[in-house]
Amino acid sequence: QVQLVESGGGLVQAGGSLRLSCAASGTIFSITAMGWYRHAPGKQRALFAAITGGGSTDYADSVKGRFTISRDNAKNTVYLQMNSLKPEDTAVYLCNAEVYGGLPYPTLSWGQGTQVTVSS
């Protein structure tokens, strides 16, 4: 069983920065894709940043140029550096990971989420 734990959320003023971390633990042979989602009030959960096992990244237009996703494979951790934060970035931020953990197929694991609130 694999667990993902996010950290680093909090309250920040508009224009500020936060760095989120998401660490995976458990039976892990390898992790392929990892991603960050966010769930804002009244909106659906949406993927906005993703990174492959080889380090290729992709971003939603709404965060491109402001957010950077990265990973440390040795630590089974994915990071999200968020700069120039806006009030509309306020949401619960969740990570997920495609994990090979002893089964002959990958499983998708989710973290519990961390709240990010950006004040104007």
Image (spheres, helix red, strand yellow):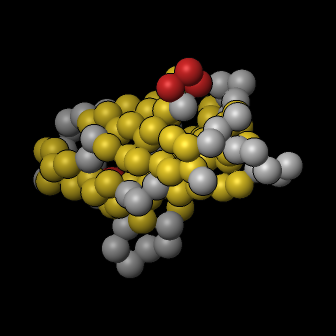
For residue 36, above or below residue 28: below
Question: In the depicted view, which residue is nearer to us: 57 or 115?
Answer: 115
Q: Percent position (x, y) of residue 103?
A: 79, 50
Say which residue appears at 28% left-offset and 41% top-offset.
Answer: 8
Say which residue appears at 14% left-offset and 44% top-offset.
Answer: 13
Question: In the depicted view, which residue is nearer to us: 84 or 114?
Answer: 114
The answer, for residue 12, to whether it is visible in the render is yes
Say which residue appears at 43% left-offset and 41% top-offset.
Answer: 22
Q: Percent position (x, y) of residue 83?
A: 31, 33
Say which residue appears at 50% left-offset and 51% top-offset.
Answer: 3
For this orientation, the residue located farthest to the bottom is 42
- Left or right: 97, with 62 as reference point: right
For this orientation, the residue located farthest to the right is 104
For residue 108, above or below residue 58: below
Q: Percent position (x, y) of residue 111?
A: 46, 55
- Left or right: 114, with 109 as reference point: left
The answer, for residue 61, to whether it is visible in the render is no
- Left or right: 80, with 13 as reference point: right
Looking at the rendering, which quadrant does residue 49 occupy? Answer: top right
Q: Percent position (x, y) of residue 19?
A: 32, 34
